[in-house]
Image (cartoon, grey):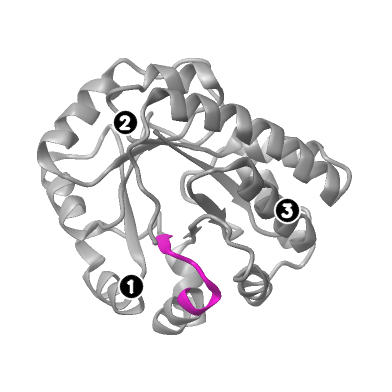
Amino acid sequence: MAFMPFVTAGDPNIQTTRAVLLALKDAGVDLIELGFPYSDPIADGPVIQASYTRALDNGITVEQILQMMHSLKDHQVPPVLAMVSFAIMFRHGTAAFIQQAAAAGFKGLIIPDLPAEEAEETAALARAAGLDLVQLIAPTTTEKRTRQILQASSGFLYCISVAGTTGVRQELPLELTQQLRSLRAQSTLPLAVGFGISGPDQVAGLAGVADGVIVGSAMVKRIAAAETPEQAAAITRDFAQQMQQAAAAARPSLNPAP
């Protein structure tokens, strides 16, 4: 099973983000989700919302994030996917953002406020730039919308474990296993579970039904507790190694994009 941590770009500054991404590479994570701070996040809980606020208050920009990614191109970091609001892309220029993201080294896009039925143009632009467009599926997604999402998705499916916002939870719902098995029957794309994954025990509980796990709030909380970029790197490296070991023991399935 693959492990994919989430990091907020620019929290509290871009130097810390760069140090954390290099630490995650050292920890051997499979993929990384890099969040572009946004003042009106769609499904993020209080921990990630607070990280976005810190980054925005400190002046983070799209250009700084892209430049930081450029600086890592020779460091062999795992594939990085941008978690970015479509509002940010639209304001930047959708085609321009996609081209610049690809040039900076991103491997895919996760756009939480882009409905599947409106994703065709963006998906075509992403494909042309060599980027995957990862779609989110929630427990409340209807059968019709699920079919649309499956048609628009590439890379893997981002399976939201619970209805509501992101955040650390002690238990995952029993209905999640049923949903994952249903999706498995409908698609050959790998299934990665996010929202509420906070520790190795939850990873073990997904063995045999998921191909990957995404951990956001638990990672962001650790970065927020650090006082220096070096401390943030050390803390996240240790946590990522624990989660990576749990994921590897569960089942290695989700192969990162080349």
Which portion, as a residue range, is magenta? 102-109
Q: Which residue bears the numbered disc 1?
A: 126
For image coordinates 46% across by 68% down, the residue present is 87
Residue type at mark 3? Asp
Asked if the residues shown at circle 2 and circle 3 are in contact, with their CB atoms under 8 angstroms apart, the answer is no
Helix, strand or loop at label 2? It is loop
The answer to whether residue 74 is magenta is no
Q: Residue at x 50, y 36 (%)?
A: 166
The residue type indicated by label 2 comes to Ala
Camera-nearest residue between 252 and 226: 252
Q: Which mark is residue 184?
A: none
Q: Quadrant of the C terminus?
A: bottom left
Query: Residue tagged by mark 2?
Result: 210
Categorize mark 1 by other alpha carbons within 10 Å: few (<14), some (14-19), many (20+).
many
Secondary structure of the residue carrying tag 3 is loop
In the rendered view, would you say 161 is above or below 67? above
How far is the residue under mark 2 from the one under mark 3? 29 Å
Image location (x, y in percent) of residue 119: 26, 66
N-term mark: 3 or 1: 3
In the rendered image, which residue does mark 3 sit on? 11
Left or right of 209: which side holds 19?
Answer: right
User: Along the line of sight, which residue is nearer the eye, 126 or 57?
Assistant: 126
**Which quarter of the image is occupied by the N terminus?**
top left
| Mark 2 vs 1, N-terminal side | 1
Quadrant of res 13: bottom right
Q: Secondary structure at mark 1?
A: helix
Question: Quick check: 216 left or right of 26?
Answer: left
Could you say where residue 117 lies in the image, as x and y percent from the top left?
20, 61
Which residue: 71% across, 56% down?
A: 17
